[in-house]
Image (spheres, helix red, strand yellow):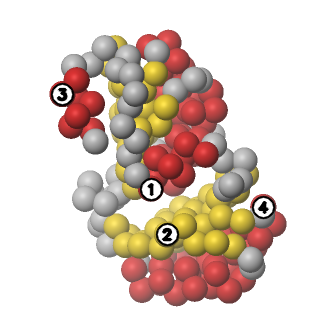
Amino acid sequence: MIETIGFLELNSIAKGIEAADAILKAAEVDLIFAKPSCPGKYHVLFTGEVAAVKASLDAGAAVGGAHVVDQCVIPRVHPQVIKAINLAAPPSEHNAVGVMEFFSVTASIYGADAAVKAADVTLLDVRLGTGIGGKSFVILTGEVAAVSEAVRCGIQAENSQGMVVSSVVIPNPRQEIFDSLM
């Protein structure tokens, strides 16, 4: 089970690949993914024990230098965050949908983790910058009050502030909206 994640966002693909290698060599961590995204950024997501993740992130950030856009370590990350990053999950019920949009990919990870820990919601997708100009967004669902609270907490997460583009809560969206999200 994934308990701690590290995430490094760089504005150079070449330096991103070099930083990913440094991350993996610095400590005992497991790579979830290392890949390019728009607009010419590179993202590295990895997991391990807290101390190992911190040491690896420090090593990757040192290699990335001035190319580092953002970085984070999230201990006790909610399991839904990784599931939603890797593959959008279709909703079992259609109550309300919440969307949080950020300028930073890292901010969306913080926002998603804060949101799902704040209320009884299901993360559907955490989209990390590919094909959307380097921005990111989080989609979640649940009861209207829970979605409202989750979105409020997600956009107010300590490391998300200043990076929010917009957020919405839509009560009882039409089925076509859910279909278009998957």
The disc labelled 1 sits on which kind of residue? Asn
What percent of the width, then of the height, locates residue 71?
Answer: 58, 62
Label 2 and label 1: CA atoms lie apart by 9 Å
Callout 3: SS: helix
Q: Which residue is mark 2?
A: 33
- Residue ID at (40%, 52%): 87
The disc labelled 2 sits on which kind of residue? Phe
Callout 4: SS: helix
Say the numbered circle drawn on residue 86. 1
Label 3 and label 2: CA atoms lie apart by 31 Å
What percent of the width, then of the height, locates residue 12?
Answer: 41, 78
User: In the picture, which quadrant includes the C terminus?
Assistant: top left
**In this picture, is 68 found above or below 19?**
above
**Frontmost residue, 165 versus 35:** 35
**Frontmost residue, 136 versus 87:** 87
Q: Is residue 22 left or right of residue 176?
A: right
Callout 1: SS: helix
Which mark lies nearer to you, 4 or 3? Answer: 3
**In this picture, is 28 found above or below 120?**
below
Who comes first in sequence, dot 4 or dot 3?
4
Who comes first in sequence, dot 2 or dot 1?
2
What percent of the width, then of the height, locates residue 52?
Answer: 77, 70
| Disc 2 crowd, CA 10 A, few/some/many (<14, 14-19, 20+) | few
**Frontmost residue, 57 versus 145:** 145
Q: Could you tell me if the residues under marks 4 and 3 are in contact, i.e. CB atoms within 8 Å?
A: no
Q: Could you tell me if the residues under marks 2 and 1 are in contact, i.e. CB atoms within 8 Å?
A: yes
Q: Quarter of the image holding residue 115?
A: top right
- Residue ID at (22%, 28%): 177
Q: Which residue is mark 4?
A: 50
Q: Is residue 139 something one can see in this rendering?
A: no
